[in-house]
Image: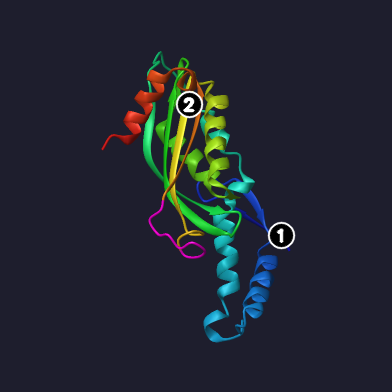
């Protein structure tokens, strides 16, 4: 049965088949040699189902809607929000990657609320994906919805798929960037953005 739940931050409905997830988790526990009916695991399938509904809630919303609220403002310099924390799920191993996003844009006569940039990052992050795609998605949304002159998005994250398994290199950071418009064409503007991002 598909159960309708709601996104905590927006109330937008999303469809998650929690019973199907629970059955799958029980099967995985059995497949690895565990007993899904022992006391410590009895509620694990339902916990995982609720967790996945939260972690993948971004699949069932349109993050660009947060950028529909704009304010006319004749400001044409950099607007940048640094250190937006996020967690997402690597689609290759279904293990989380956790980090910070830095999002900047040069307005074209209108700006959006600063919290809206963080909401976009939050909702885009809540889906299975790779970091490269997440970076491009955030940049594309800001460029198209705000019609910005320039956009820069830099993500830095630690991927548990390479820290707790495989190569096992805790502390290794993956950094991705997406640059659009003026910030891609003008080296001085791009350098300014990177200086603001890297400023301690």
Under circle 2, the secondary element is strand
User: Residue 128 colored magenta?
Assistant: no
Q: Is residue 50 left or right of residue 184?
A: right
Q: Where does label 1 land, which residue? A: 2
Q: Is residue 32 left or right of residue 71?
A: right
The residue range painted magenta reads: 164-172
- On the image, the x and y values in percent for residue 90 come to 56, 54
Under circle 1, the secondary element is loop
- Label whose residue precedes the other's in the sequence (1 or 2): 1
Residue at x-position 57% and y-position 63%: 50
Residue 151, disc:
2
Query: In the image as oriented, which residue stretches furthest toward the right?
Result: 1
Residue at x-position 65% and y-position 74%: 28
Q: Image height check: is 112 above or below 167?
A: above
* Residue 175 sits in quarter: top left
Q: Image height check: is 39 above or below 144?
A: below
Within 10 angstroms of label 1, few (less than 14), some, or many (20 or more) residues? few
Residue at x-position 50% and y-position 47%: 9
Within 10 angstroms of label 2, few (less than 14), some, or many (20 or more) residues? many
């Amino acid at each position: 049965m598909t159960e309708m739940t709601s996104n905590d931050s927006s109330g937008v409905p999303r469809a998650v088949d929690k019973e199907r997830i629970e059955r799958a988790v029980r099967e995985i526990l059995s497949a690895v040699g565990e007993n899904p009916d022992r006391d410590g695991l009895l509620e694990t399938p339902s916990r995982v189902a609720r967790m996945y509904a939260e972690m993948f809630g971004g699949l069932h919303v349109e993050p660009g809607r947060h950028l529909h609220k704009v304010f006319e403002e004749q400001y044409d310099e950099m607007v940048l929000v640094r250190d937006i924390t996020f967690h997402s799920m690597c689609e290759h191993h279904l293990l989380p990657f956790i980090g910070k996003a830095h999002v900047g844009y040069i307005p074209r006569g209108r700006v959006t609320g600063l919290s809206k940039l963080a909401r976009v990052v939050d909702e885009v992050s809540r889906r299975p994906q790779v970091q490269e795609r997440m970076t491009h998605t955030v940049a594309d949304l800001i460029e198209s919805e705000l019609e910005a002159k320039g956009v820069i998005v830099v993500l830095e994250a630690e991927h548990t798929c390479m820290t707790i398994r495989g190569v096992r290199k805790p502390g290794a950071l993956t950094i991705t960037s997406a640059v659009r418009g003026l910030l891609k064409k003008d080296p001085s503007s791009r350098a300014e953005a990177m200086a603001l991002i890297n400023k301690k």
